[in-house]
């Protein structure tokens, strides 16, 4: 304090103030007599000071509220810590979301199937050959029926594919049956064998034998 009081409200005027901090009345500047600086003045000059951005008055460092214009000019240490913590949390959330979006943009990994062995490949090829022979046999037998529309076939897996004993070593047959009407409308069971000859890795059709 400068020891000077406001002429309007009798409020003590801070040192260097140009107006009363209470009523805003202008302060008449009194030039103090020149005297050697006291110890208190020397301590004051050594104290770090800032400038209020509103009233342009010098204020002590780390001042939160200006003592002249009563406006907030700074943040307390606690508020600064809270602000820094909030900024770090927001930054961490943004980074985590960016990582999730990057990983979600890639398609899911497709499991790699182990390579098939030559034996497995050969078994699959043989199974397809036998299935083709069964389908051809069914078509030929159905075309030889008196009433093909009345045919009732068993489950496809009931057809047997086997070597025909008594014939050549490379003759195989599709053995099965079908229920269908004859010329008189009676439902009869027809047993049949479709013979195939194995040529290399393929089967060639020979004939249909009705039993």
Image (cartoon, rainbow, N blue to C red):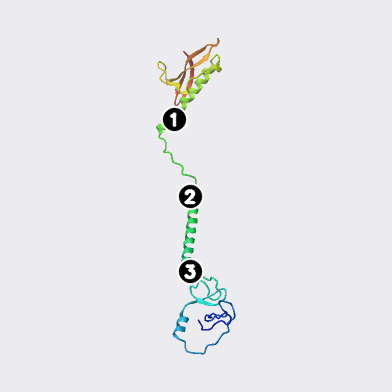
Nearer to the camera, 59 or 131: 59
Q: Earlier in the sequence, mark 1 or mark 2?
A: 2
Q: Position of residue 79 (x, y in %)?
A: 48, 66
Residue 101 on image: x %, y %: 50, 51
Picture quadrant of residue 71 = bottom right
Q: Quadrant of residue 21?
A: bottom right
Q: In front: mark 3 or mark 2? A: 3
Q: Secondary structure at mark 2?
A: helix
Q: Earlier in the sequence, mark 3 or mark 2?
A: 3
**Residue 108 image offset from top left, x and y in percent:** 48, 44
Q: Is residue 198 above or below residue 63?
A: above
Residue behind mark 2: 103
Quick one: label 1 or label 3, which is nearer the N terminus? Answer: 3
In the displayed structure, does residue 88 sit left or right of residue 28? left
Number of residues whose C-alpha sits closer than 10 Å to that of mark 2, classed few (under 14), some (14–19) or many (20 or more): few
The Cα atoms of the two marked residues, 3 and 2, are separated by 41 Å
Q: Residue at x 46, y 66 (%)?
A: 78
Residues at circles 3 and 2 in contact by the CB criterion of under 8 Å:
no
Q: Say which element carries label 1.
A: helix
Between 77 and 175, which is closer to the camera in this rendering? 77
Judge depth for marks 1 and 3 and give the one in front: 3
Tag 1 residue: 124
Q: Indicate left or right for 30 with 196 as reference.
A: right
View extreme (top): residue: 184
* Nearer to the camera, 121 or 63: 63
Residue 76: give its label: 3
């Amino acid at each position: 304090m400068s020891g000077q009081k406001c002429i309007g409200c009798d409020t003590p005027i801070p040192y260097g103030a140009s107006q009363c901090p209470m009523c805003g009345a202008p302060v008449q500047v009194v030039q103090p007599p020149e005297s050697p600086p006291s110890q208190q003045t020397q301590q004051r000059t050594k104290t770090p000071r800032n400038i209020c951005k509103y009233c342009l008055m010098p204020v002590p460092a780390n001042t939160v509220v200006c003592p002249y214009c009563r406006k907030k000019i700074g943040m307390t240490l606690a508020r600064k810590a809270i602000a820094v913590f909030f900024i770090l949390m927001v930054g961490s959330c943004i980074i985590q979301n960016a990582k999730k979006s990057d990983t979600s943009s890639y398609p899911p990994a497709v499991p790699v199937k182990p390579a098939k062995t030559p034996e497995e490949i050969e078994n699959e090829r043989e199974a397809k050959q036998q299935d083709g022979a069964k389908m051809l046999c069914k078509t030929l037998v159905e075309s030889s029926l008196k009433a093909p529309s009345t045919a009732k076939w068993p489950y496809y897996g009931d057809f047997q594919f086997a070597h025909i004993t008594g014939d050549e070593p490379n003759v195989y047959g599709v053995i099965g049956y079908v229920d269908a009407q004859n010329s008189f409308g009676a439902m009869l069971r027809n047993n049949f064998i479709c013979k195939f000859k194995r040529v290399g890795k393929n089967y060639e059709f020979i004939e249909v034998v009705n039993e």
